[in-house]
Image (cartoon, rainbow, N blue to C red):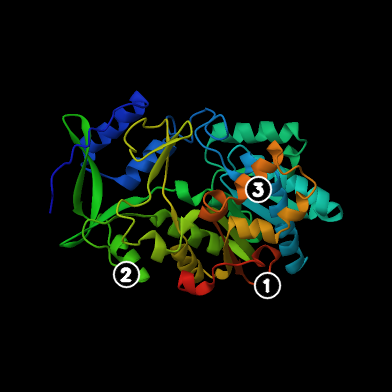
């Protein structure tokens, strides 16, 4: 069912050794799924975007996250975590497990918030970080050491390594982690769902459309009761489903907080999103060409929160609530925390950036799930524009 290559004039800019690795793999194994390309471009052990050293994150990098904007983001998360800690029985230490800690800012700010708001219980909290990149681990340790907090944190290279110490009890946390997991790219055709592959034409990257590499892709949309119309492109994050199953298996009792940009499936795969949601970031510019600056730009796709909720339910993680970042931070008292600030001060303008409905405040969503506990209403979910029915659970 090969439909031929489509040369999009894709640039070969990027890390030459990484581009050559991709070419060689295609020559040896044939066309490459986009998920495999994205995995290589971002996580190659030597040349991957997240693995190689460099200032990727922050106002001086390629993109910034909420912890880069203002430390209040982490300190308010600490308030929610303190409430969660009071819900669970105090029979063992409470672990906060952060997936992909970036520069370590969120870890620093949460620990500072715990010290400020729960000084008597601070020693009960154990903070662990899952981080694949040795370069990022070094940055995190440097930042936390300068804040006097490094001794409060442990690092693991994967969730399995952390879980090997025993069932998790506490809170699993991720902020802009899921959007960077490798995605398959698919397209609706007259013959049904097909997959978009990367191939070579005279050493140039070209895309081709063929049968899906795995039946999991069709099953994904079947589970959502969604049919992709002809010509409609979309991204499928099978890794996110595998990850949340792994979390569900590792978490014995506690909560999971997932913060990321995305939508419920009904909106993410709506007909008006003809080209999908894949975006690339380089020095605070946005483009839709993942084949340029290979290894030197970030590649992301919006998160399908419906599938996260559904797969989590299958793994024993019940939906506690679903909201957006604006309502989450307002519920946790960000207005009260900033009421003494000058409305026109740079600090207040940073806070407003966290809350902006058209960007961070509205696009970023917060999904909270729980396991092994019947939770009372959580403070961060007081204002809730979305309910469980939007997630089809």
Q: Nearer the viewer, residue 179 or 343?
A: 343
Mark 1 or 3: in front is 1
Quadrant including the N terminus:
bottom left
**Residue where numbered disc 2 is placed:** 222
The percent coordinates of residue 260 (x first, y second) are 52, 52
- Looking at the rendered structure, the secondary structure element under dot 2 is helix
Disc assigned to residue 96: none
The earlier-in-sequence mark between 1 and 3 is: 3
The percent coordinates of residue 76 (x first, y second) are 71, 53
Q: Quadrant of residue 307?
A: bottom left
Q: Nearer the viewer, residue 119 or 162?
A: 119
The percent coordinates of residue 299 (x first, y second) are 41, 41
Measure the alpha-carbon separation of dots 1 and 3.
23 Å
The earlier-in-sequence mark between 1 and 2 is: 2
Q: Nearer the viewer, residue 227 or 182?
A: 227
163 versus 142 height, above or below: below
**Residue where numbered disc 3 is placed:** 128
- Looking at the rendered structure, the secondary structure element under dot 3 is strand
How many C-alpha atoms fall within 10 Å of the one at disc 3: few (<14), some, or many (≥20)? many
How many C-alpha atoms fall within 10 Å of the one at disc 1: few (<14), some, or many (≥20)? some
The earlier-in-sequence mark between 2 and 3 is: 3
Residue at the (44%, 30%) spot, across then down: 46
Disc assigned to residue 375: 1
Q: Is label 1 in contact with label 3 (beta carbons under 8 Å)?
A: no
Residue at the (22%, 37%) spot, across then down: 8
């Amino acid at each position: 069912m090969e439909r031929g290559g489509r040369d999009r004039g894709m640039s070969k800019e990027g890390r030459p050794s990484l581009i050559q690795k991709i070419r060689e793999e295609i020559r040896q194994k044939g066309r490459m799924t986009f998920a495999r390309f994205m995995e290589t471009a971002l996580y190659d052990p030597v040349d991957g975007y997240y693995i190689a050293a460099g200032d990727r994150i922050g106002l001086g990098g390629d993109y910034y996250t909420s912890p880069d904007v203002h430390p209040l983001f982490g300190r308010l998360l600490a308030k929610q975590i303190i409430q969660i800690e009071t819900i669970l029985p105090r029979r063992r230490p409470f672990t906060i497990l952060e997936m992909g800690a970036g520069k370590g800012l969120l870890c620093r700010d949460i620990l500072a918030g715990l010290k400020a708001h729960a000084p008597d219980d601070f020693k009960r909290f154990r903070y662990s970080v899952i981080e694949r990149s040795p370069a990022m681990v070094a940055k995190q340790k440097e930042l936390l050491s300068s804040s006097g907090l490094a001794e409060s944190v442990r690092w693991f290279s994967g969730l399995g390594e952390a879980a090997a110490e025993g069932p998790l009890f506490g809170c699993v946390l991720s902020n802009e982690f899921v959007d960077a997991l490798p995605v398959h790219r698919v397209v609706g055709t007259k013959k049904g769902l097909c997959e978009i592959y990367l191939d070579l034409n005279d050493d140039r990257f070209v895309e081709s459309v063929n049968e899906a590499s795995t039946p999991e892709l069709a099953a994904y949309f079947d589970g959502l009761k969604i049919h992709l119309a002809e010509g409609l492109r979309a991204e499928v994050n099978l890794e996110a489903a595998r990850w949340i199953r792994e979390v569900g298996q590792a978490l014995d009792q506690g909560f999971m907080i997932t913060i990321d940009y995305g939508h419920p499936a009904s909106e993410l795969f709506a007909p008006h999103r003809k080209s999908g949601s894949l975006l690339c970031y380089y020095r605070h510019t946005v483009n839709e060409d993942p084949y340029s600056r290979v290894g030197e730009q970030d590649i992301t796709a919006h998160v399908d929160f419906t599938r996260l909720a559904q797969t989590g339910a299958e793994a024993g993680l019940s939906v506690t609530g679903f909201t957006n970042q604006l309502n989450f931070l307002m519920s946790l008292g960000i207005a009260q925390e900033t009421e003494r600030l000058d409305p026109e001060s740079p600090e207040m303008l940073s806070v407003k950036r966290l809350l902006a409905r058209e960007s961070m405040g509205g696009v970023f969503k917060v999904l909270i799930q729980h396991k092994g506990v019947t939770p009372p209403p959580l403070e961060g979910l007081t204002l809730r524009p979305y309910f469980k029915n939007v997630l089809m659970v």
